């Protein structure tokens, strides 16, 4: 089974702090994603990465950056956390298009509260 | 462009009765379609997927969905609801032009009454 692991399930951070959310997948997937999920707004794509050191902005990249130094690891960084970044963050991974399997797999989520 | 519309934000059924969660999609090409379930405080779990094989797709936990191209629909059904089915369900279409992108519906919360 594919496993996407988000190391922190619940975090409380102060406004202005730098926050790292870590995600690891064990299926050698090329693609990795970070979403945030808010009530009434559904899932919104923050960033995705299709290879090591490669990244593309999603729909709401402002206030976030990402790092992908190794294929299995994709980190989301909040340079200076703000209260409007309080949310549930979901990491996901998928194989590349054309492999015959295009399913996206999710981690358990990280609940971030910024106070 | 691809998009997904889930027609009901909330559905309430009694335990043992059928479940119908509705999804319509928009896609210029034959899409890859998915249903995911999310239990409270959990990530999204794949229920089933359609990738241009059989139009009736069977998934986990007794769920199934039928792809109807003429109606651009991919509704999720289950013959008999169980209390453990109470969760939020997402219909998802995979991007064709933006091949790494997935388009999510807004979700349907299923409530199961005893």
Image (cartoon, rainbow, N blue to C red):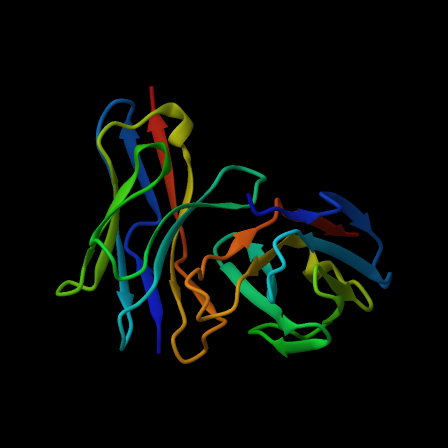
**Could you say where residue A99 lies in the image, as x and y percent from the top left?**
46, 66
**Could you say where residue A90 lies in the image, as x and y percent from the top left?**
61, 54
Question: What residue is at 46 percent from the left and 70 percent from the top?
Answer: A97
Give the residue at the far left of this rendering.
B70
Question: What residue is at 38 percent from the left and 24 percent from the top?
Answer: B83
Give the residue at the far front of this rendering.
A99
Q: Nearer the viewer, residue A38 or A28?
A: A28
Give the left or right position of residue B72, taking residue B47 as reference.
left
Give the left or right position of residue B59, taking residue A52 as reference.
left
Q: Is residue A16 above or below residue B96?
A: above
Which of the 4 image quarters holds residue A62? Answer: bottom right
Question: What residue is at 72 percent from the left and 50 percent from the top?
Answer: A112
Q: Is residue B21 visible?
A: no
**Could you say where residue B13 lies in the image, as x and y percent from the top left?**
27, 31
Which of the 4 image quarters holds residue B67? Answer: bottom left
Question: What residue is at 33 percent from the left and 41 percent from the top?
Answer: B59
- Quarter of the image with the N terminus of chain A in it: top right
Give the left or right position of residue A67, taking residue A43 as reference.
right
**Could you say where residue B105 lies in the image, as x and y percent from the top left?**
39, 59
**Count of numbered circles on the image:** 0
Q: Is residue B54 visible?
A: yes
Q: Nearer the viewer, residue B11 or B47?
A: B47
């Amino acid at each position: 089974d594919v496993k996407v692991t988000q190391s922190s399930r619940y975090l409380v951070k102060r406004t202005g702090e730098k926050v790292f959310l870590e995600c690891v997948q064990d299926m050698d997937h090329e693609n990795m994603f970070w979403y945030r999920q808010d009530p009434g707004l559904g899932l919104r794509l923050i960033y995705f990465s299709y290879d090591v050191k490669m990244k593309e902005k999603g729909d709401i990249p402002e206030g976030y950056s990402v790092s992908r130094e190794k294929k299995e690891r994709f980190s989301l960084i909040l340079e200076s956390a703000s209260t409007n970044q309080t949310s549930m963050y979901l990491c996901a991974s998928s194989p590349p298009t054309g492999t015959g399997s295009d399913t996206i797999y999710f981690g358990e989520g990280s609940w971030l509260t910024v106070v | 462009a691809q998009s997904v519309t889930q027609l009901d934000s909330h559905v309430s059924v009694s335990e043992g009765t059928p479940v119908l969660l509705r999804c319509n999609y928009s896609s210029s090409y034959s899409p890859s379609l998915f249903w995911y379930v999310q239990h409270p405080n959990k990530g999204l779990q794949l229920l089933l997927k359609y990738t241009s094989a059989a139009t009736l797709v069977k998934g986990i936990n007794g769920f199934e969905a039928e792809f109807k191209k003429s109606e651009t629909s991919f509704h999720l059904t289950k013959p008999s609801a169980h209390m453990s089915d109470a969760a939020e369900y997402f219909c998802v279409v995979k991007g064709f032009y933006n091949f790494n992108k997935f388009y999510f519906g807004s979700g349907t919360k299923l409530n199961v009454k005893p």
